[in-house]
């Protein structure tokens, strides 16, 4: 089957995020299937660039991938909601132009719903099927970012927009069973929803290597047991819980240190918390590091910790990082939120603790650190899981049947 597909994206490389990494993995595998993929980003891509990098280019090639861009059009501050309306109008106009030029057989629009609604208009206008891939619900992400609260008027309106789009697109894709169940519960036919699971490119990950002793010494981690997190510091990641547990862990194991690599909205709050708890000399904040350097920091960590708080976002959505950790043969401890439950078999491919419980986290960390004899088995079982079940080729194969039905329907 050959197909020309136009992907509509929130943002893309050169910005680095879980969103952009998943996008590239999907595109690579679609290209391997012989599909002709094209790519358009929303105005939010430009908003995410540093000021010095902002341009008004309409097309751009990054690392061999060609993108059509939607320029950011500056506007005055407006009433709540009008900014989103303007963003959708800008994307709709740009998508209309690009779609008329490319004449794709399918418009494949990715979260958020601000992309889906303009794509629906253009698709109906040009007679092109529109599929919608949901990676998370926009309203739940807004709750975590603190821009709204669950059950608020904005929350309900955004949820209604999402459901409106779901009912009108030709097919729905999503990343995990938690989201699929929520979508079906909104009245969407089960056979209209397909899961494209988060996965990893197994060839891009090698089992963990030896720690760089010079880097370890520079960070003050020599002769220490290192608990680590590498990623973005969002509130839902629960890093505050890890810091809250640290004083109790240090009573049992004075050699423990916490290594936090990355940055984000919670950066300053976490540093202040470490000071308040009196553990600032036991927590190392490296700041963001170049992507090419990340593996060096992974190699310093004895035990990766993913202590996500329980909320709709984390209960429904599966993250990528635990899969990447398993692919590298890492040992990980994670909260038992729904998104982790889909990925981690407790005591088999990793370890789970009761979400939002400092006591449970302390107990599980203490037990895992004292049972290192089991780590080789956990490492091999985690690696085998991603090799056999969570690779991108297997995930992307799930597009074939729904795409095929839409092409036959045309």
Image (spheres, grey):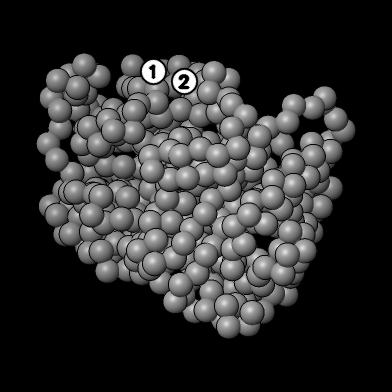
Quadrant location, the C terminus: bottom right
Quarter of the rendering containing residue 252: top left
On the image, the x and y values in percent for residue 397 come to 41, 72
**Callout 2 touching callout 1 (CB < 8 Å):** yes
Picture residue at 57% right of the left edge, 78% below the top: 407
Quarter of the rendering containing residue 74: top right
On the image, the x and y values in percent for residue 342 come to 43, 64
Viewer-proximal residue among 253 and 112: 112
SS of the residue under disc 1: loop
Question: Which residue matches tag 2?
Answer: 271
Judge whether 296 appears above or below 283 on screen. below
Quadrant location, the N terminus: bottom left
Judge whether 94 appears above or below 124 on screen. above
Mark linked to residue 280:
1
Other residues around mark 2 within 10 Å, as few (<14) / some (14–19) / many (≥20): some
Picture residue at 19% right of the left edge, 22% below the top: 215
| Image side of residue 304 versus residue 146, left or right | left
């Amino acid at each position: 089957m050959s197909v020309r597909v136009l992907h509509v994206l929130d943002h893309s490389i050169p910005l680095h995020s879980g969103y952009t990494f998943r996008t590239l993995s999907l595109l690579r595998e679609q290209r391997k299937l012989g599909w002709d993929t094209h790519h358009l980003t929303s105005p939010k891509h430009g908003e995410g660039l540093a000021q010095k990098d902002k341009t008004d280019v309409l097309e751009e090639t990054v690392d061999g991938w060609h993108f059509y861009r939607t320029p950011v059009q500056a506007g005055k501050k407006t009433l709540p909601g009008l900014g989103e309306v303007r963003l959708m109008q800008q994307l709709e106009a740009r998508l209309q132009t690009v779609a008329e030029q490319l004449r794709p057989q399918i418009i494949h629009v990715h979260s958020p719903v601000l992309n889906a609604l303009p794509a629906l208009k253009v698709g109906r206008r040009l007679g092109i099927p529109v599929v919608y891939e949901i990676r998370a619900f926009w309203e739940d992400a807004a709750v975590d970012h603190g821009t709204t609260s669950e059950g608020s008027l904005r929350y309900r309106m955004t949820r209604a927009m999402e459901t409106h789009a779901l009912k009108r697109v030709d097919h729905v894709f999503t990343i995990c069973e938690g989201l699929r169940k929520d979508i079906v519960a909104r009245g969407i036919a089960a056979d209209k929803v397909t899961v494209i699971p988060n996965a990893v490119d197994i060839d891009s990950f090698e089992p963990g290597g030896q720690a760089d002793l010079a880097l370890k010494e520079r960070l003050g981690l020599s002769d220490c047991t290192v608990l680590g997190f590498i990623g973005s510091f969002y509130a839902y990641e629960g890093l505050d819980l890890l810091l809250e547990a640290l004083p109790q862990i240090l009573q049992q194991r004075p050699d423990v240190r916490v290594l936090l690599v990355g940055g984000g909205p919670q950066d300053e709050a976490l540093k202040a918390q470490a000071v308040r708890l009196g553990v600032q000399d036991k927590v190392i904040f490296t700041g963001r590091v170049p992507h090419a350097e990340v593996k060096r920091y992974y190699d310093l960590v004895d035990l990766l910790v993913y202590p996500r708080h329980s909320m709709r976002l984390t209960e429904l959505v599966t993250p990528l990082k635990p899969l990447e950790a398993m692919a590298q043969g890492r040992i990980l401890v994670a909260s038992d939120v729904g998104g982790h439950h889909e990925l981690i078999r407790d005591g088999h491919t990793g370890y789970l603790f009761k979400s939002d419980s400092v006591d449970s986290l302390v107990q599980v960390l203490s037990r895992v650190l004292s049972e290192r004899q089991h780590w080789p088995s956990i490492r091999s079982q985690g690696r085998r899981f991603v090799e056999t079940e969570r690779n991108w080729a297997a995930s992307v194969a799930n597009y074939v049947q729904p795409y095929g039905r839409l092409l036959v329907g045309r």
